[in-house]
Image (cartoon, rainbow, N blue to C red):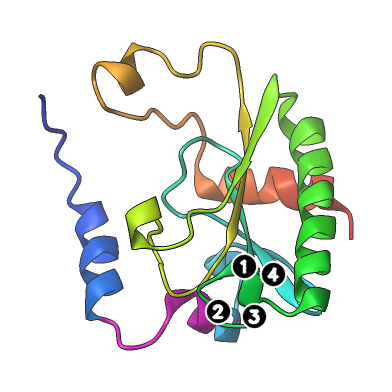
Amino acid sequence: MDHLWTPWRYAYISAAHAEEGCILCEKPSQDNDRKAYILHRAEHCYLMLNTFPYTSGHVMITPYEHVDQLQKLAPAAAAEMMALVQKVEGALREAYQPDGINLGMNIGKAAGAGVAGHIHMHVLPRWFGDGNFMWTIGETRVMPETLDTTFERLQAAINF
């Protein structure tokens, strides 16, 4: 296996284990939504860009409520989460014209959750052929646009 030097990622990895708080709880307390990549704040959940995306347009829908299981989420927050998923799907289709959409949650560390204590939904566009040799053989992702560009495109498409 080849290794790609990504020192910028160390800040994320070390912070995730060193922090006593929850990054998904702390994110909404930041005073600059653009800098925090928060696209929208709803009553029970907020939308933000994944800062380590699988592909451009990778959005996370996160409840304000800190729970580690979907079944623990208040019904109103769960309903709002699904309504936001629908809205994000439409925005992604408008902004990126993808061939498909991935939607999912990794609940618990064993399931691959990067922040296991706070559930969140991933919504991201997919295209035929986007799982090319760079991902499958090179184990490297190539991002065609910056997070700032993604933020601008999706904020224009979401239209709340």
Residue 42 rendering spot, x and y as whole percentages: 80, 73
Q: Earlier in the sequence, mark 2 or mark 4?
A: 4
Kindly check if marks 3 and 4 are in contact, taking CB atoms under 8 A apart as contact.
Answer: yes
Alpha-carbon span between mark 3 and mark 1: 13 Å
Q: Quadrant of residue 139?
A: top left
Label 3 crowd (10 A; few <14 / some 14-19 / many >=20): many
Q: Is residue 95 visible?
A: yes
Residue 35 rendering spot, x and y as whole percentages: 54, 67
Label 1 crowd (10 A; few <14 / some 14-19 / many >=20): some
* Label 1: which secondary element: helix
Q: Earlier in the sequence, mark 3 or mark 4?
A: 4
Alpha-carbon span between mark 2 and mark 4: 15 Å
Q: Three-letter amino acid code at disc 3?
A: Tyr
Give the numbered dot on residue 67.
2
Q: What residue is shown at x 50% (from left), y 83% (from top)?
A: 26
Q: Quadrant of the N terminus?
A: top left
Kindly check if marks 2 and 1 are in contact, taking CB atoms under 8 A apart as contact.
Answer: yes
Q: Which residues are magenta?
A: 19-26
Q: Which residue is the site of mark 1?
A: 70
Which residue of the protein is positioned furthest toward the right in this rendering?
160
Between label 3 and label 1, give the one nearer the viewer: 1
* Label 4: which secondary element: strand
Q: Three-letter amino acid code at disc 1?
A: Leu
Between label 4 and label 1, give the one nearer the viewer: 1
* Label 3: which secondary element: loop
Q: Nearer the viewer, residue 141 or 114?
A: 114
Q: Which residue is the site of mark 4?
A: 46
Give the numbered dot on residue 64.
3
Q: Earlier in the sequence, mark 4 or mark 1?
A: 4
Q: Earlier in the sequence, mark 3 or mark 1?
A: 3
Alpha-carbon span between mark 4 and mark 1: 16 Å
